[in-house]
Image (cartoon, rainbow, N blue to C red):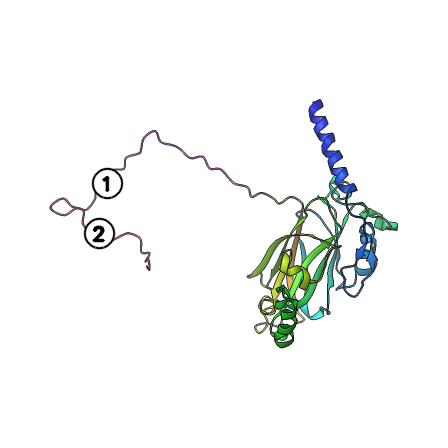
Amino acid sequence: MAMAMDEEDQVKVNTDDAVRQLSRMPARCPVQKCGETVFPSNLMMHMLEKHAYGFEDVNSEIYDHVPLMLHFDPKVIENGNCCMVTLCYGGVKDQLETQPGLSFLSLPNVGLINNQHKYDNFLPIMMMVCRTTWFAQFNDKQMEDELTSKNGNKAGIYVFWLVAPNITRKLYYTLTAYDRYYHNSRSVIRTVRDFSSCQNPSEFMPGEDNYLLLRDSEILELMSLGRLNCYSQDNKERGIPMELIIYENPLKPSIQEHPVKLYSKMPHTKGTVPRTVNGKVSLTKRPFSKTIAFL
C-alpha cells in the first residue's frame, strides 16, 4: 500500500512539474485580423471577449468524447485566418477532477470575471479556417507564389485546424465533414496545435499534417450544388455539416470474443462424390457458387 501511494505521489509530482515547465511567453492571437499579443493564461479571457461571437455566433462548451455538431458556410469566410468556433474544453463531463487546469494538462486561466469563472480550469480552443491554394503545401515559396498568380483560382482549398495554449500531453480530435444527406464524408484524426507556433497554413502545411484539407471540388460535392439548392428556405442550417470530437485518450475498439469449440479429433461428414465408371472424380462437376472470377 505504501509503495502504491509513493508511486501515486510521484506521478502527481511529475505532472505538476510538467505544468510548471509550460511556457508562459505571450504569442500573437491566431486570428489574422486581431493580431493582439496574448499570454497563454489569458487566452480564455481574450477568446470569450473578442472572438466568441465573431463568426456565425458559435461558442460552445465541449467535453471528452462528446460529439459537437457544427455547420460550415464557405460563403461567409473572409480572407486570412478566421476563428470558426470558440470552444471551452472541460475534460470528462461531470467529472471536476478531469478539467484541464486540475488534471495537470494546462495552466489555469486568469482574468475571467463574473459567470466566466466556471471556465477557470477549462482549456480554450479555437477552431480555425483559412482559404488558400493547393500550392501552399510547397516548400519552395517562390514557386508557390508563381503558381498561385497563374492558377490560384483553380487550386482553392479550405484548411481547418484547432489551436490551444501549450499543454503537457497530446490532445486529439476527430473532425468530419458530411454532405447534407450524410451519404459522403471526409474525416481526419489530428492533434491540437500550440497557438504560439506559426498559424499560417503556407508555413506549417509542408511540415505537418494536423489539419483537415478540403478542395473546392470537395466543398461543392459536399454542398450538393447543382442538384438541390442548399440555401433554400427549407434549410435552417446552411453549408456543410461537421462533427467535432475532442479527447485526450483515444478509445480502444471493443473486441467481442466468441468461444470456439475445439474438437479432439476432426469430425467426419458422410457424403457421396460423383465419380465416373473407372472411379475417378468427374472433371465436369460444376461449383455451387455462381461467383465469376475475372483473372
Q: Residue at x 15, y 46 (%)?
A: 280
Compared to 261, does 216 lie above or below?
A: below
SS at circle 1: loop
Residue 271, label in figure? 1
Q: Residue at x 67, y 45 (%)?
A: 248
Compared to 177, does 149 lie above or below?
A: below
Q: Is residue 122 left or right of residue 136?
A: right
| Label whose residue precedes the other's in the sequence (1 or 2) | 1
Residue 261 painted magenta: yes
Q: Can you give x and y, in whole percent of width and height, for residue 240 in the image? A: 64, 64
In the depicted view, which residue is nearer to us: 250 or 177? 250
Q: Is residue 180 left or right of residue 257?
A: right
Identify the amino acid type marked 1. Gly
| Region of the chain picked out in magenta, as a range | 256-266
Q: Residue at x 69, y 65 (%)?
A: 130
Whole-angstrom CA distance, mark 1 to mark 2, is: 15 Å
The quarter of the displayed image where residue 36 is located: bottom right
Q: Is residue 15 left or right of residue 293?
A: right
- The residue beneath circle 2 is 285
Can residue 238 be spotted in the picture? Answer: no
Q: Residue at x 19, y 51 (%)?
A: 283
| Quadrant of the drawing holding the C terminus | bottom left
In the image, farthest residue toward the left: 278
